Every structure is written in structure tokens, then in C-alpha cells.
Amino acid sequence: MKLFKKVILIFCGSLCVLLGIIGLILPVMPSTIFFMVAGLCYINSSKTLYNRLIKMSYIGPTIESYVERKEVTRKFKIYSMLFLTIPTIVTQIFIVEHWISRVVSLLLLILVAWHILSLKTVDKAKIVLDANKKDDR
């Protein structure tokens, strides 16, 4: 069973990395959240893949900060809340017609927003400094 769980987590993590790379290319698709989910999958299944992911200069320190210390920057919180709430509200107003879909969507919005806002807020400099300290070890 442990092997099955490991394979599923590696598959999900790899899928998230692929979606994150697509998100780097497409301006309307977020990438950071997919890399963070990949980090969570990899840290629980493959330390090699996790280490390779956090070595990425663009997003690695942010992933490591989130996965290992549950901290993000203020900029990340603001952008993630904007990219979460605006599409949800627009969808609620113009697309969703059934009340159950609205309730589920708003409940998910509240839960994800609560998680994001509950994370510790740090400066980008601290994240980079912590990543550099880990590289020195």
C-alpha cells in the first residue's frame, strides 16, 4: 500500500509541475500554487524530486518556505486572494445558476481563503536568506 501511495503522490506532483510550467507560459493560469502542491506531494513521496523542485531559482525558495515552514510573502497572499475571489465572484454572478453550486463554490472559497490567511507572513528577503542558509549546509 505504501508503494501505491508513493506512486500516486509522484504522479500528482508531476502533473502539478506540468501545470505549473504551463502556468508560467499562459498569463491567465497561476503557476505558484501548482508548484506548491507538487512540493507537498514530493516531500511525502520522493526527497529527490522535492530537492530538484526547490532548486528552481524562480520558485524554489517560495515552495520550500510554504512546505517546510508554512510561511508566504504578503505579495503571495494578496495575489492569491485576488486570483481566488475575483473569478469566483464573476462566476457566481454571471454563470452559476443552481444554488447548490453556489454554496459549494462559496464554501470552497472560504476554506481556501482561511488557509491562505492563516499562513505566517514573511518578507521575500527572509525566504531567500533561509534558502541560502540551507544551501550552505
Image: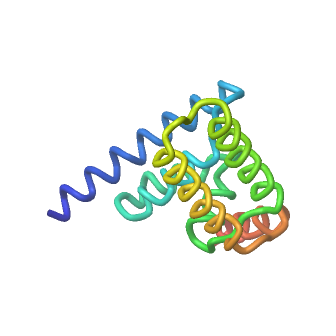
User: Image quadrant of residue 43?
Assistant: bottom left
- Left/right of residue 7 with respect to residue 98 in the rendered view: left
- Left/right of residue 29 with respect to residue 45 in the rendered view: right
Q: Is residue 49 above or below residue 45?
A: above
- Left/right of residue 24 with respect to residue 11 in the rendered view: right
Task: Report the residue at 57% width, 38% height from top.
Answer: 20
Task: Report the residue at 14% width, 63% height from top.
Answer: 1
User: Of residues 33 and 104, which is closer to you in this image?
Assistant: 104
User: Of residues 86 and 79, which is closer to you in this image?
Assistant: 86
| Count of marks overlaid on the render | 0
Q: Is residue 129 above or below residue 105?
A: below
User: Of residues 131 and 2, which is closer to you in this image?
Assistant: 2
- Residue 30 location, x and y as percent? 65, 39
- Residue 33 location, x and y as percent? 60, 49
- Residue 37 location, x and y as percent? 50, 53
- Residue 50 location, x and y as percent? 48, 56
User: Image quadrant of residue 124?
Assistant: bottom right
Task: Report the residue at 71% width, 71% height from top.
Answer: 133
Task: Report the residue at 37% width, 46% height from top.
Answer: 12
Q: Residue furthest left?
A: 1
